[in-house]
Amino acid sequence: MKTRAAVALEKGKPLTIMDVELDGPKAGEVLVEVKATGICHTDDFTLSGADPEGLFPAILGHEGAGIVIDVGPGVASVRKGDHVIPLYTPECRQCPSCLSRKTNLCTAIRATQGQGVMPDGTSRFSLDGKKLHHYMGTSTFSNFTVLPEIAVAKVREDAPFDKVCYIGCGVTTGIGAVLNTAKVEPGSTSVVFGLGGIGLNVIQGLRLAGADMIIGVDINAAKKQWGERFGMTHFVNPKELGGDLVAHLVNITKRGADQIGGADYTFDCTGNVSVMRQALEACHRGWGQSIIIGVAPAGAEIATRPFQLVTGRVWKGTAFGGARGRTDVPKIVDWYMDGKIDIDPMITHTMALADINKGFELMHKGESIRSVVIY
């Protein structure tokens, strides 16, 4: 069949809108009509050429929502007509990682997913008879896409596609980092570095967890209003500080008789390795945890003095917020529909597929929180 898609023909170039061929689902696969997809920084990271695993030509996109149109042999967990969110982190529930209950990083299809193909080693997308790579196993920058059954989460049918698509990455990553990875306790102090789409959802997660002091750090003064909208209690702009950022954060988090200072939890949402160090060193000695969410450029390394770790601070990483997609994503959709979390204000721009490159421009200019393509 033909499908309209935004194709990344080569790195560093704008996406090209065109019709491509899409083969139907094979055993264990589903065909999904994508109704809406978010434009995420990870898509831009790959398109820029900075992603060491980036493959071209490819159909990017990993933050979508849509309807199952067809299923291949053996598919049992979803059927035609189901509303689903594609999962770039699948959940097979059978591999050693899933069975361990220690991680959400399912390994069932990791090897082929990283090669830009389906589990049988072939692509469902082609252009003029030549293979197009899948992206993160999802490729939601196509009006129709094929995914493994284990890489779709069935969700309620009354949830709006143009809002819950954001749960396919940004919302779940931010909130999940708080609830699943850090396991933040009520009354905690926290610092969030970078108040973009992920950072705002971290703040939202901290509010859900009952954090007491929620400090947002961003060099864009306009983000103060955004952070406060989602539960931030304090804002720090390093450009306006006129002093050492870490010392300032340690000072404002002092409490109790010891007056040591430092946050119980910090979150890096920037992908900047210098900021990652600041985030760790702004933690409280003895128990502070710093969660790395942002993706750093290829070859980048993090560093700190060993003393920071010897005295009890912990660095942790998280992918997809530690969420198990088929299990947790439907619950987060319910939270949104029940008013426990807010998504609508973060969808700052919507557009047709033909205008998708404008969404990337808005991202680069810092004028959007999340742009969503509606098919």
Image (cartoon, helix red, strand yellow):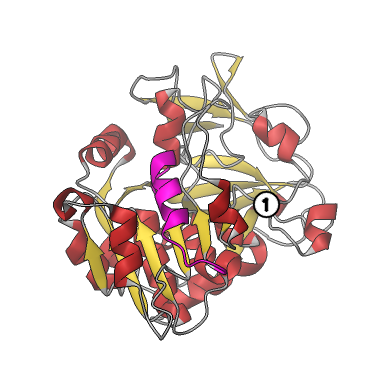
Q: Is residue 234 magenta?
A: no
Left or right of 372: which side holds 283?
Answer: right
Residue drawn at x 51%, y 20% as measured from the top left: 57
Residue sitting nearer the eye, 365 or 303? 303
Pinpoint residue 179: horizontal percent, then vertical percent.
54, 71
Pinpoint residue 223: horizontal percent, then vertical percent.
21, 58
Residue drawn at x 40%, y 56% as measured from the top left: 198
Q: Quadrant of residue 146?
A: top right
Magenta stretch? 269-287
Residue sitting nearer the eye, 179 or 341? 179
Count every numbered label the image shows and give the total.
1
Question: From the viewer's perspective, is residue 357 above or below residue 85?
Answer: above
Pinpoint residue 94: horizontal percent, then vertical percent.
84, 57
The answer to whether residue 242 is seen in the rendering is yes
Quadrant housing the N terminus: top right
Residue drawn at x 23%, y 65% as measured from the top left: 235
- Amino acid bearing label 1: Pro
Label 1: which residue? 90
Q: Is residue 273 magenta?
A: yes
Q: Secondary structure at mark 1?
A: loop
Residue drawn at x 64%, y 30% as measured from the top left: 124
Q: Quadrant of residue 25?
A: top right
